[in-house]
């Protein structure tokens, strides 16, 4: 037996020499496209079953990272087989077996999820639906790089097969960008499923073709390329560092995704941006000549991390600025970590072990964010904690501290601590408090922390000092920006719920407020004279309140009302003894809080008679309700400002109409800060050929702060007669027909909603 060598003279052999690297790169690029385009696709398929929660993506990423680890582990074990021909035969055989799970679909073997324990159901369903093909496809990149190192051992490019990792991540990056911009807007989910299944089949043919090309490259009838020389093993300390360098970007990717998607939408166009940037850092880090050199990357990381630490606790109306700063901090942190990883890559014979350690680090980061953090933290602390901890992965510097570095460090600490100190002075000094304009404290604090960030940046080459300064800034910002002194904070799979006490003398004094993310979900006066007055979006003056009152006027003998989204239970304040009221709520924690009179008493105190709660995703649980049951349905299921799109599709609205009595109506609460979702809802009503009316209610400027809130709603009737009382009310109007494509269970375009909102804001 002799090794593969390159024929020295024939032109055809020289051409094959040039074509072999291209064939390997194309195969790796294609497998990466398939691996990463399927992630938002499958998650979008399963998202409606779990209420559209932003946590679905983070939990799904744990599955994908674990499946990736399984694929890399398989690739590493396969290298113990000396024959590449045998390795190829095994891999092709497993690709064929995994094809039995196609066409791509969500496996319903586990039934409906339990709202009290959704993560186990989600991970199990993904494993049954996509686990086998995803894991085998994931193994392709390290396998082909290992084969390439052996086949091209006699060539210069064979000495650095890690360059092909850049091609792999480039394919992943382009696939992810294509999903929200091209695939999601242009193709239905069923088309996407079949398209991906077809791509898998084409890739299988490509691997078979590549194996044939490689086998035929024998100048002297050599059946196998030689094994690579064995390098020293990777030490345990080095393995630990590789895992940490991989875990930090993985954790931050999920952290920044949750941070951004909680207030916009749980949607692929927001999921894929951090993931695409994550992959782009791999592309840059593993280039032979990086587009961003490591020393430049370290400088940008220092600036972005400091600026993000100064802003991370604050909510601002400049959504684009928040988006940019958080993504910049994430990108340069990931780039810093991945460039340090690339600098530590071992010899080619340790390639699959290296990728196995990277994959394990990715799983560690994902598990921490999606499974551990929700249990040990009652707030989303994992994002700022890892942002600061990642600074410790920068070079520490071995020479003695310089005096100016100590001065800058102490100065940054003093300035970062100034806002909490000034806040305490304001609390006990009315004269000083009067000097600060009302509501300007967070803005002033943010400006002070910006100064601290600039000074902290000067000690970026001292990782420990830099990390301490940033940690102080984050703590200071969180202390100032908390807004209320929270009486209760609880966290579940579906988000963070907080209850606080504030003052509103016009409503009797003490007010309990409920917040989910950054959105108020309810407020109730604790004084007896105002306790049972529905507030905010549910006030009698808003579209939701108007619909409740008109329904009760039409049905003095008793109305049957259903509300999707329980919140503080404010709609229960409308319930008369003769009415029947049902809440459809996915989060058991919300139901428990809203029924506890210690916090809110709309349900247990104000409602006349029992109030029913059905736990689970509303689309699933409402299917079990008898047709023609309800006089009024209110759809108000928002997680912070995120949109559960499956509740606004043609099929969803058709399901609501099925539950209505002949004169019944459904009210869609469409208030949203970042997305234009009224036109898709109207388009769905048009597609069903049912009458609808629209209203935007603006809260009174001279009213109590918690009494009402500006509200946008669309009301849909089962018949024209059902909407007659609302047409007679001048506050409701008919919208012009829209040419926006209606959302369906097979098609949702949230990216288009974002663009429409931006255009409206620019006018």
Image (tube, grey):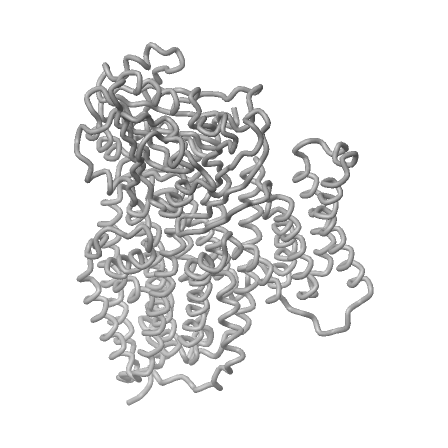
Find residue 26 and report its horizontal and vertical position in percent. Answer: 35, 61
* Quarter assignment of residue 335: bottom right
x and y percentages locating residue 519 in the rendered image: 48, 38
Whether residue 32 is situated above or below residue 56 in the rendered picture:
below
In the image, taking residue 575 as reference, residue 255 lies left or right, namely right
Q: Nearer the viewer, residue 503 or 268?
A: 503
| Number of residue marks | 0
At 51% from the left and 72% from the top, the residue drawn is 242
Q: Which residue is more in the foreground, 103 or 700?
A: 700
Considering only vertical position in the picture, is 434 above or below 20? Answer: above
Q: Which residue lies furthest to the right in this view?
A: 403
Judge whether residue 283 can be spotted in this image: no
Which residue lies most toward the bottom here?
1
Depth check, front residue: 430 or 143: 430
Q: Residue 490: give x, y in percent of width and height.
A: 47, 50
* 755 relative to 591, above or below: above
Report the residue at 51% width, 40% height from top: 518
**On the rendered structure, is 549 left or right of 560?**
right
Left or right of 526: which side holds 638?
Answer: left
Measured as percent of width and height from the top left, residue 521 is found at 45, 36
* Quadrant hosting residue 150: bottom left
Question: Relative to the observer, which residue lies in front, 610 or 616?
Answer: 610
Which quadrant would the N terminus be assigned to in this image?
Answer: bottom left
């Amino acid at each position: 037996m002799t090794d593969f060598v390159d024929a020295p003279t024939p032109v055809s052999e020289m051409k094959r020499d040039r074509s072999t690297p291209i064939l390997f790169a194309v195969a790796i690029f294609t497998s990466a496209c398939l691996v990463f385009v399927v992630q938002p696709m499958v998650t979008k398929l399963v998202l409606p079953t779990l209420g559209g929660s932003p946590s679905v993506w983070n939990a799904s990423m744990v599955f994908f990272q674990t499946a990736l680890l399984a694929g890399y582990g398989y690739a590493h074990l396969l290298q113990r087989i000396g024959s590449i021909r045998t390795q190829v035969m095994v891999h092709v055989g497993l690709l064929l077996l995994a094809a039995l799970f196609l066409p791509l679909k969500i496996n319903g073997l586990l039934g409906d999820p339990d709202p009290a324990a959704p993560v186990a159901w989600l991970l199990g369903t993904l494993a049954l639906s996509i686990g086998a093909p995803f894991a085998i496809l994931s193994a392709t990149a390290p396998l082909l790089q290992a084969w390439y190192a052996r086949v091209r051992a006699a060539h210069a490019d064979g000495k650095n097969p890690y360059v092909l990792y850049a091609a792999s991540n480039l394919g992943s990056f382009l696939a992810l960008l294509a999903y929200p911009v091209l695939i999601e807007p242009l193709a239905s989910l069923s088309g996407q499923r079949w398209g991906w299944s077809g791509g898998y089949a084409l890739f299988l043919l490509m691997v078979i073709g590549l194996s044939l090309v490689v086998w035929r490259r024998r100048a002297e009838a050599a059946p196998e390329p030689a094994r690579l020389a064995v390098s020293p093993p990777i030490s345990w300390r080095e393995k630990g560092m590789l895992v940490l360098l991989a875990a930090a970007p993985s954790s931050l990717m999920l952290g920044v995704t949750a941070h951004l998607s909680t207030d916009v939408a749980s949607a692929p166009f927001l999921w894929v941006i951090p993931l695409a940037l994550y992959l782009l850092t791999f592309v840059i880090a593993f280039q032979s000549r990086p587009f961003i050199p490591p020393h430049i990357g370290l400088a940008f990381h220092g600036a972005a991390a400091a600026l993000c630490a100064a802003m991370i606790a604050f909510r601002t109306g400049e959504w684009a600025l928040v988006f940019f700063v958080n993504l910049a901090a994430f990108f340069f942190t990931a780039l810093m970590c991945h460039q340090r990883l690339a600098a530590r890559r071992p010899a080619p014979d340790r390639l699959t072990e290296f990728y196995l350690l990277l994959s394990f680090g990715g799983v560690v980061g994902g598990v921490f964010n999606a499974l551990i953090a929700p249990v040990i933290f009652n707030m989303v602390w994992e994002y700022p904690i890892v942002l600061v901890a990642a600074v410790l992965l920068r070079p520490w510097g071995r020479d003695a501290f310089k005096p100016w570095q100590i001065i800058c460090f102490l100065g940054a600490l003093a300035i970062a601590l100034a806002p909490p100190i000034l806040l305490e002075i304001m609390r006990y000094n009315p004269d000083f408090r009067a000097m600060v304009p009302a509501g300007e404290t967070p803005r002033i604090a943010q400006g002070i922390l910006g100064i601290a960030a600039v000074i902290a940046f000067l000690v970026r080459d001292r990782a420990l000092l830099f990390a301490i300064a940033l940690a102080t800034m984050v703590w200071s910002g969180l202390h100032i920006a908390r807004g209320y002194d929270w009486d209760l904070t609880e966290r579940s799979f579906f988000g963070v719920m907080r209850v606080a006490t504030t003052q509103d003398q016009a409503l009797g004094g003490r007010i309990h407020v409920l917040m989910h993310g950054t959105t108020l979900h309810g407020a109730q006066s604790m004084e007896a004279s105002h306790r049972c007055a529905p507030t905010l979006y549910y006030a009698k003056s808003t579209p939701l309140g108007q619909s409740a009152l008109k329904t009760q006027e039409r049905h003095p003998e008793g109305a049957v009302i259903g509300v999707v989204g329980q919140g503080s239970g404010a709609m229960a304040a409308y319930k008369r003894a003769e009415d029947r009221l049902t809440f459809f709520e996915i989060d058991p924690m919300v139901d428990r809080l809203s029924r506890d009179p210690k916090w809110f008493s709309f349900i247990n105190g104000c409602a006349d008679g029992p109030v029913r709660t059905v736990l689970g995703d509303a689309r699933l649980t409402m299917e079990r309700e008898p047709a023609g049951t309800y006089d009024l349905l209110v759809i108000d299921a928002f997680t912070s400002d995120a949109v559960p799109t499956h509740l606004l599709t043609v099929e969803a609205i058709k399901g609501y109409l099925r539950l209505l009595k002949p004169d019944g109506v459904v009210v869609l609460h469409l208030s949203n800060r970042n997305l234009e979702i009224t036109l898709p809802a109207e388009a769905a009503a048009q597609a069903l050929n049912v009458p609808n009316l629209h209203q935007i209610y603006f809260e009174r400027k001279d009213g109590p702060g918690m009494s009402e809130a500006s509200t946008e709603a669309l009301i849909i009737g089962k018949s024209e007669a059902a909407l007659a009382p609302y047409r007679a009310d001048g506050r409701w109007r008919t919208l012009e027909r829209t040419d926006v494509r209606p959302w369906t269970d097979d098609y949702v375009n949230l990216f288009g909603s974002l663009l429409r909102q931006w255009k409206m804001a620019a006018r």
